[in-house]
Image (spheres, rainbow, N blue to C red):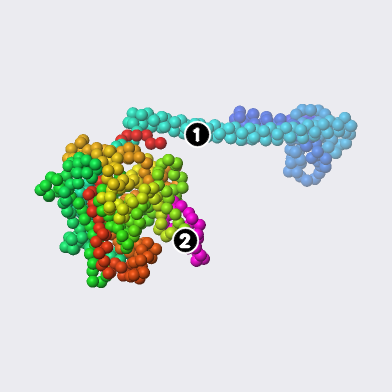
């Protein structure tokens, strides 16, 4: 038995030496083989189990089969690592010699259990190594992400700090928040040079019973001209404004005369009267607009207006009616017309003296009338609870501010402050002229001074509360971009979609006599002579640009 084991071991060593001579290996591979041998030794029990069927070394299968079986037995014995007891068990099992004791069987079972435990431990170590590698990779990626984010935040902080430092060095941006500066003065012979004369019928929306004529035709018909008249020294309670308000373009030879712009209408054979519509050349996105008027068109059928708009982009760019009269109305109103999302129900208390116009009797979709009384404070032209294109309408708290009562008092001054930077549009009226605030009176008195330093700057804060106040801009319910790129318009319409539709209510006696507004206009009654503008001037100011931090 021992001789057989010795021979098998010897043969196994000789085989290994022969393999090394034929295939030399480096030290690393040798270490790998030693590890493999150790691993093989740990699986000796498996070798024993695989030998249960035995080896037939004495069979007639030839040298090849013998060599193959001998090699197998040699490998199994080598796997036992020199353990005599295990080698005996292998030989007994492989050669079917029998004689295995209970101790050998117990040892075999213990080795098999140790092999299983070793395998599980090896598997666990492999799993743990893989898990540790994955966790290490994840930690590495997380660290990289954290580093990148930290660098990005650091870069952002550096940029913010640099911007703040730069801002402190350069200062705040320029904004139109300074005092008002005169940008346009329209007086005397120069008045019409600031406008074009629209020629043609009225728009479909207004549908007035008139025909607008060009400048040459208007001059020929004498419905647009400049007339010089003696100064009224008591217009403002003293003569200072009249003496200093001489325009350089005036051609009058008397220093005691002042120019007035007249615009009126004239009859036609066809019926609609000739009229004048002026459209300003300059466009505005803000400003203080002041009109000094001594007489405005008034009476039944009249529908005059002094307003701002951008017709090709209406109502996208909005509309502001500064002064508008209809038939025999006597209280001034300011109306804003816009697209959606422009409401005025957030006006702070104490900002105005006037009230909102109302909407009642508006037809509903089913044809019935909505008799709910609502304030007209939605500027949207198609608001379903207001009259079509009614807009948001502020009404003055003072009576006799337009129409015949205004004309009897010698006119008045109308001002609109459109100030999106300070988030509001405000409207003022002062009539008669003796009620004009000192700052405003001095501003008009010095507007024609050739030296800008001698001009008094108007300051609406010194005029008292406006009758109309419209919040616009940030933190309001109407963004400032609802109103932009507008120019001034003067016009005189007759009848049409407003004055004509209200004619039966406002002028019932004339309705009964003539049947409708158009027949009354075509009759060319003496009352048509009261339908004219008499204007001392239009003055436009804009805030100067200054560096300022806006709230």
Name the residue located 83 percent from the left edge and 42 percent from the top edge. Answer: 53
Principal secondary structure, stretch drawn in magenta: loop
Q: Quadrant of residue 113?
A: top right
Region of the chain picked out in magenta, as a range = 362-385
Local crowd size for mark 2, using a 10 Å CA cut-off: few (<14), some (14–19), many (≥20): some
Where is the C terminus found, in terms of image quarters?
top left
Q: Quadrant of residue 547?
A: top left
Residue 446 located left or right of residue 53: left
- Camera-nearest residue between 113 and 407: 407
Q: Nearer the viewer, mark 1 or mark 2?
A: 2
The residues bearing labels 1 and 2 have C-alpha atoms spaced at a distance of: 61 Å
In the picture of the structure, the residue carrying the numbered disc 2 is 362
Where is the N terminus found, in terms of image quarters?
top right
- Camera-nearest residue between 188 and 54: 188
The reply to whether residue 6 is in sight is yes
Residue 76 located left or right of residue 266: right
Instruction: Say if 425 sits above or below 147 in the image.
Output: below
Local crowd size for mark 1, using a 10 Å CA cut-off: few (<14), some (14–19), many (≥20): few
Name the residue located 46 percent from the left edge and 33 percent from the top edge. Answer: 152
Q: Is residue 507 magenta?
A: no
Task: Say which mark, if any, is on residue 97.
Answer: none
Name the residue located 16 percent from the left edge and 51 percent from the top edge. Answer: 228
Secondary structure type for disc 1: helix
The reply to whether residue 312 is in sight is no
Secondary structure type for disc 2: strand
Q: Is residue 373 magenta?
A: yes
In the picture of the structure, the residue carrying the numbered disc 1 is 149
Instruction: Say if 344 sits above or below 2 in the image.
Output: below
Q: Where in the figure is residue 348, as x and y percent of width and height? A: 44, 42
Name the residue located 30 percent from the left edge and 38 percent from the top edge. Answer: 459
């Amino acid at each position: 038995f021992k001789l057989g084991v010795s021979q098998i071991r010897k043969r196994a060593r000789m085989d290994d030496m022969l393999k090394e001579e034929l295939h030399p290996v480096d030290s690393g591979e040798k270490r790998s083989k030693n590890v493999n041998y150790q691993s093989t030794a740990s699986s000796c029990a498996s070798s024993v189990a695989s030998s249960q069927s035995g080896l037939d070394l004495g069979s007639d299968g030839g040298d090849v089969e013998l060599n193959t079986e001998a090699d197998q037995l040699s490998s199994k014995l080598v796997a036992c690592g020199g353990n005599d007891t295990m080698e005996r068990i292998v030989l007994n099992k492989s050669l079917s010699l029998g004689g295995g004791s209970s101790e050998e069987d117990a040892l075999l079972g213990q080795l098999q259990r140790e092999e299983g435990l070793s395998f599980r431990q090896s598997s666990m170590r492999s799993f743990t190594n893989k898990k540790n590698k994955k966790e290490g990779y994840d930690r590495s990626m997380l660290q990289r992400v954290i580093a990148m984010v930290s660098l990005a935040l650091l870069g952002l902080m550096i940029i913010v700090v640099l911007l703040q430092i730069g801002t402190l060095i350069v200062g705040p941006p320029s904004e139109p928040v300074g005092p008002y500066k005169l940008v346009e003065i329209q007086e005397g012979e120069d008045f019409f040079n600031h406008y074009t004369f629209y020629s043609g019928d009225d728009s479909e929306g207004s549908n007035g019973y008139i025909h607008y004529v060009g400048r040459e035709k208007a001059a020929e018909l004498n419905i647009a001209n400049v007339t010089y008249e003696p100064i009224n020294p008591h217009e403002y309670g003293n003569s200072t404004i009249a003496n200093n308000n001489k325009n350089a373009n005036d051609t009058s030879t008397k220093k005691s005369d002042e120019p007035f712009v007249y615009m009126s209408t004239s009859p036609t054979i066809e019926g609609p009267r000739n009229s004048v519509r002026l459209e300003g050349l300059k466009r505005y996105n803000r400003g203080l607009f002041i009109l000094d008027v001594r007489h405005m068109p008034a009476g039944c059928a009249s529908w005059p207006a002094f307003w701002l708009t951008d017709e090709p982009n209406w109502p996208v760019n909005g509309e502001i009616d500064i002064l508008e009269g209809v038939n025999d109305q006597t209280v001034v109103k300011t109306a804003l017309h816009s697209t959606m999302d422009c409401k005025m129900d957030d006006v702070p208390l104490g900002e105005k003296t006037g009230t909102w116009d109302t909407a009642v009797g508006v037809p509903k979709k089913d044809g019935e009338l909505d008799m709910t009384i609502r304030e007209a404070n939605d500027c949207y032209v198609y608001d379903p609870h207001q009259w079509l294109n009614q807009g948001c309408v502020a009404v003055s708290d003072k009576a006799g501010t337009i129409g015949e009562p205004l004309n009897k008092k010698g006119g008045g001054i109308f001002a609109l402050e459109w100030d999106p930077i300070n988030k509001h549009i405000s409207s003022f009226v002062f009539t008669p002229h003796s009620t004009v605030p000192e700052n405003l009176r001095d501003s008009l008195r010095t507007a024609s001074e050739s030296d800008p330093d001698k001009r008094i700057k108007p300051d609406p804060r010194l005029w008292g509360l406006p009758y109309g106040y419209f919040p616009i801009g940030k933190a309001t319910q109407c963004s400032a971009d609802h109103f932009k790129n507008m120019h001034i318009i003067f016009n005189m319409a007759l009848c049409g979609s407003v004055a004509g539709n209200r004619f039966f209510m406002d002028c019932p006696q004339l309705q009964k006599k003539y049947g409708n507004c158009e027949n009354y206009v075509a009759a060319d009654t003496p009352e048509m002579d009261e339908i004219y503008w008499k204007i001392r001037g239009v003055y436009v100011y804009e805030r100067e640009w200054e560096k300022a931090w806006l709230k």
